[in-house]
Amino acid sequence: MKCRVCKKRAVINLRAQNRGLCEECFDAYVLDRVERTIKRYKMFSRGQRILVAVSGGKDSLGLWDILARLGYEPAGLFVDMGISRGNYYARSREVVESFAQSRGLELVVESLEAWWGRGIEKIGRRVLCPTCGMAKRYLTNRVAADRGYDVLCTGHNLDDEAAVLLSNLLNWQVGYLARQAPVLDSWHPRLARKAKPLVLLTEKESALYTLLRGIEYVEEPCPYSQGATTLRYKRVLNQVEWRSPGTKQRFYTLFLKNKGLFEGVAKEEREGLKECKRCGQPTWEGLCAFCRFMEESHGDFGREVSAGDQV
Amino acid sequence: MAKIVMEGREWEVKRRINVLRFLEKEGINPEEVLVLINGKVVTEDAVMEPQDEVKILWVLSRG
């Protein structure tokens, strides 16, 4: 297959767009696609303080690289959740630090243990993906908001978003549907604005970008990973995509077009927002999900390092 | 013969074969993989020759 633009040997067949692209034209396509996504959804602009949550995986490192190449000034945030099995976080941290160093990018490193005296393996009876994810979201939001970043970016791609959308629809999770968006505004001073600049890139495109850029990343999943459900939805969608190219993008972008259907729920949620009695984070309950979990697990859950303290 | 590896799985193919045909035969969705022949990323219409080293990379993250 030849590149549609320059006729060189293609490295990818973008079947949804009915064109092949060579390495150089694919690189230009990715940069353009992400820049357009940022503008289309009014995510952020140059000069703003951007924090990218980086795990050491292909999507987040690829995103960090793209934003830097586009002339934004993104700092990275690596949160060590305290998973020692398989040396997982130590290896991830090494990969992230080496990436930041090689590109002269600012990296913020935080750890659950430094904030609350223990890592995720020592909280609760066993490590559960949803709990770890919730704690990670909590911590990344706090770091971004407390340190005054304008936006917190994550590397969610089109496959991630389409799979979550399918899951939310199959279970009619209207609250989640109301909240699912490429950019989430801050409704509260302690709630960081969030953006997902890769939402219009497929997982295959994101992986190819990282590969062609020679970015070293952690390939193995977390040793406690229980992502089987999301993976199943991704695979179902890819089966449809193979037969009907463009399905994933239509599914997601047409959902965004029709999001007004959930505006009533979204409004109710915004109006019902309170502050957590323990940490002051926005929540719909008396205690936020994180503090509730910590209190249920430990009663007194240790020292909380105040915002902005170096850990 | 062409040696094809994918996450611990391994195949040896004696004759030249089209990438797409191989993936379909093995039940691998081309949307979910990148194929490298002798270290170069190729599209599904590429052909694997008997002397080629082929690596198939699974792209979906598992959490």
Image (cartoon, rainbow, N blue to C red):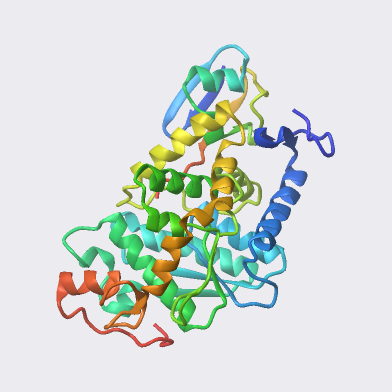
Work out whether B48 lies above or below A129: above
Work out whether A283 lies above or below A231: below
Tell me, yes or no, if residue A167 can be seen here.
yes
* Residue placed most toward the observer, A96 or A253: A253
- Residue lying at 44% horizontally and 80% vertically, measured from the top left: A190
Picture coordinates of residue B53 (x, y %)? 59, 27
Quarter the N terminus of chain B occupies: top right
Residue A116 horizontal side relative to residue A99, left or right: left
Picture coordinates of residue A205 (x, y %)? 61, 44
Residue A160 horizontal side relative to residue A285, left or right: right
**Residue sticking out furthest to the right:** A6
Work out whether A116 lies above or below B12: below
Residue A281, located in which quarter of the rendered image?
Answer: bottom left
* Residue placed most toward the observer, A182 or A304: A182
- Residue lying at 62% horizontally and 66% vertically, measured from the top left: A43
Residue A92, located in which quarter of the rendered image?
Answer: bottom left
State the count of labels.
0
Residue A78 horizontal side relative to residue A115, left or right: right
Tell me, yes or no, if residue A84 can be seen here.
no
- Residue lying at 57% horizontally and 77% vertically, measured from the top left: A150
Picture coordinates of residue B12 (x, y %)? 50, 18
Work out whether A162 lies above or below A156: above
Picture coordinates of residue A97 (x, y %)? 51, 67
